Image: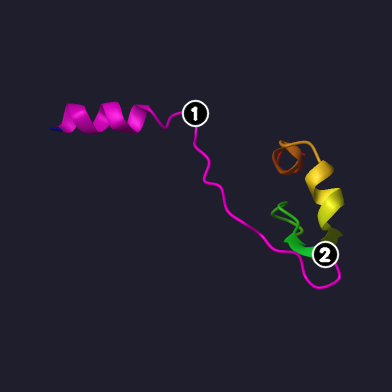
Amino acid sequence: MFEELLKILDEFKDGYSVPIEISADNDGYLDRECPKEDCLSKFKINEHDWCELPINFPTRLNNK
């Protein structure tokens, strides 16, 4: 039983993604938060601009 659980968990070792829908406000902006621990400032970004960012953009911010 424990070995079976380890096999299942091993499938997630590289992470996983869950798609979610985020709606822009009436002006076309998304509310975001800086992912850096020492910042966490809230800001708005145009929905189109957000979609044009590289997929790993937030990850790169966390590593700086």
Residue at numbered disc 2: 29
Q: Residue at x 42, y 32 (%)?
A: 12
Q: Is residue 7 above or below residue 59?
A: above
Circle 2 packing at 10 Å, graded few (<14), some (14-19), many (20+), is some
Q: Residue at x 58, y 53 (%)?
A: 20
Residue nearest the observer in this picture, 47 or 64: 47
Q: Residue at x 26, y 29 (%)?
A: 6
Q: Is residue 24 visible?
A: yes
Q: Position of residue 23 (x, y in %)?
A: 70, 63
Residue 6's disc is: none
Q: Position of residue 7 (x, y in %)?
A: 28, 26
Q: Position of residue 1 (x, y in %)?
A: 13, 32
Secondary element under disc 1, as helix, strand or loop, is: loop
Q: How is the image coloured?
A: rainbow
Indicate whether residue 36 is drawn in magenta: no
Examine the image and state in which quarter residue 38 appears. bottom right
Q: Is residue 32 above or below residue 58?
A: below
Of the 4 image quadrants, the one containing the C terminus is: top right
Residue nearest the observer in this picture, 32 or 22: 22
Indicate whether residue 16 is drawn in magenta: yes
Residue 14's disc is: 1
Residue nearest the observer in this picture, 41 or 51: 51
Secondary element under disc 2, as helix, strand or loop, is: strand
Dominant secondary structure, magenta = loop
User: For the view shown, which residue lies furthest in the bottom direction?
Assistant: 26
Relative to 4, is 57 on the left or the right? Answer: right
Q: Which residues are magenta?
A: 2-28
